[in-house]
Amino acid sequence: AQRRILPMLAPRLLGHRHRQFPTEKLNFSIQRQTRLLSQATKTPEQWRAETEGSLTLDEKRIIWQKGTEMPGTGEYNKFSPKSGYFACRACKSPLYSAAAKFDSGCGWPAFDRCYEGAVQTHVDESLGMRRVEIVCGTCTGHLGHVFEGEGFTSSNERHCVNSLSISYVNEEGFRHKEGKVC
């Protein structure tokens, strides 16, 4: 009975009156929304426990202990794909589009904008200086730092991200609104 009701309700629920949607697409959408909702309700401690067996020691050091990889050593430093996106290595949430990546020459992957709500900022006063830390908006895993006013791009923002904090997803057609974090 549920399979017959969902296709009839789909157009009304999604704001379309005369268009029918295949059940498979609706089920995928519901599954994706359910997954995203469950991701958003986990605590940082739950994320750490969940990723315990899937992250390497270096990835854990950078993501959960706010470490930094050596400049110029990351797999995504010089990697510039034409499509796809970069996701948090811990929780797999999309963070940056491939189009947002640029070569700043800093030794780490650099992005000039992120997906809306994907990245949060915190003041970082470690190492005797004041910087702005960027973390994943879903699991709060450490990504790196954001710098403003350098003039590299029109957004005037440079997200300096550890390669071990992110993973590249070669998925064409993924669309999400992008914006500045600062």
Image (cartoon, grey):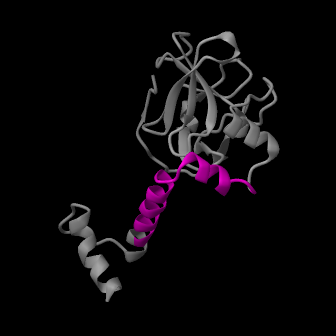
Q: Can residue 19 be seen in this view?
A: no
Q: Residue drawn 37% across and 74% down?
A: 22
Q: In this view, does 79 lie above or below 47?
A: above
Q: Could you tell me residue 53's position as x and y percent?
A: 75, 57
Q: Position of residue 167 (x, y in %)?
A: 67, 44
Q: Residue at x 60, y 45 (%)?
A: 87
Would residue 128 be found to the left or right of residue 46 on screen? right
The magenta region covers 27-53
In-image side of 26 versus 131 (left or right) = left
Observer-nearest of 84 and 139: 139
Residues 84 and 112: in front is: 112
Residue 43 percent across, percent down from the top left = 53, 49
The residue lying toward the viewer, choosing from 9 and 136, is 136
Give the quadrant of residue 146. top right
On the image, the x and y values in percent for residue 38 come to 48, 59
In-front residue for pair 39/113: 39
Q: Quadrant location of the C terminus?
A: top left
Residue lying at 28% horizontally and 70% vertically, measured from the top left: 10
Residue 167 visible in the shown view: yes
The magenta stretch spans residue 35:
yes
79 in the magenta segment? no
Q: Give the quadrant of the N terminus.
A: bottom left
Q: In this view, does 135 lie above or below 27?
A: above
Q: Residue at 20% across / 67% down in the picture?
A: 12
